[in-house]
Image (cartoon, rainbow, N blue to C red):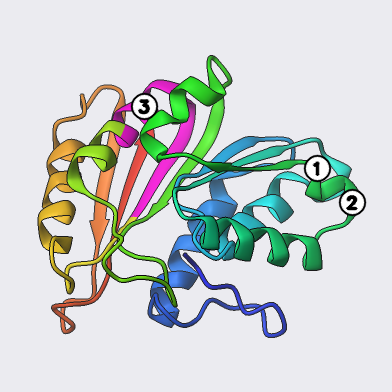
Amino acid sequence: MCYWNLKLGFPFQRIPHAMGIVLCRVWRKVVRPGDIVIDATCGNGHDTLELAKMVCADNASGYVYAFDVQEDALANSSYLLDQHLDSVQRKRVKLLRLCHSQLEKIVGETAVRLVTFNLGYLPGGDHTVITNVDTTIQALQASSNVLQPGGLISVIAYVGHSGGREEFEAVMNFAANLPTREWICSQHEWVNRPLSPRLILMCKR
């Protein structure tokens, strides 16, 4: 998650400051008012909130689907959204206690502009409950199916916790095997911080 600082206007905490800025600036280049977007790992709700503000800007009727398997995550997200969105905007966000591998079943044939993932564990929660390779790859495949041309899948992967590097490598393998005629993919990291989060971007032509 970006962990958007609601007073200062920049990301903080779990993602290093500059990486959060990069990710949110990329989102703003892609997401437009009125778009349908998915937060595949809503956590404490900071990314969900930022995306809701983007798709509901100028009184637009955009929509955010936000997934998490943990009740605490959804409760935290709901509280944050209630505090910072007006009643109309709040109705444009649907929180779902479901694995993100189920996202295609929820959105159906809806054309989605952005799907974002922040892998690993819930900050402040149980660190033994983490995303895993199998469901993450299923969710990425589902995301590629529902994404509209010009849309983006963004993934923040962490390599410092148990299973994190394997998950990152699986995401990289997924991106590397997307057809080049239909996708442009890139990976970003801090070269002098070997355990820093990795940002993977998959843009559908």
Gap between marks 2 and 3 measured at Cα? 30 Å
Q: Is residue 53 left or right of residue 111?
A: right
Depicted 142 relative to depicted 71: above or below: above
| Residue 87 numbered tag | 2
Q: Residues within 10 Å of mark 2 (few under 14, many from 20)?
A: few
Q: Residues within 10 Å of mark 1 (few under 14, many from 20)?
A: few
> Which residue is the site of mark 3?
142
Find residue 113 and report its image quarter. top right
Instruction: Compare marks 2 and 3 and give the one earlier in the sequence.
Output: 2
Return the residue found at the far top: 109
Secondary structure under tag 1 reads loop
Q: 98 and 6: which one is in front?
A: 98
Q: Confirm whether the magenta stretch covers residue 141.
A: yes
What range is drawn magenta here? 139-155
Q: Nearer the viewer, mark 1 or mark 3?
A: 1
Q: Position of residue 120 (x, y in %)?
A: 30, 62
Q: Is residue 194 left or right of residue 96?
A: left
The amino acid at mark 1 is Lys
The amino acid at mark 2 is Ser
Residue at image position (48%, 34%) is 151
> Which residue is the site of mark 1?
91
* Res. 50 visible in picture: no
Gap between marks 1 and 3 measured at Cα? 25 Å
Secondary structure under tag 2 reads helix
Secondary structure under tag 3 reads helix
Find residue 183 and report its image quarter. top left
Q: Is residue 34 left or right of residue 175?
A: right
Instruction: Compare marks 1 and 3 and give the one earlier in the sequence.
Output: 1
Residue at image position (79%, 61%) is 82
Depicted 139 relative to depicted 56: above or below: above
The amino acid at mark 3 is Ala
Say whether marks 2 and 1 touch (CB < 8 Å).
yes
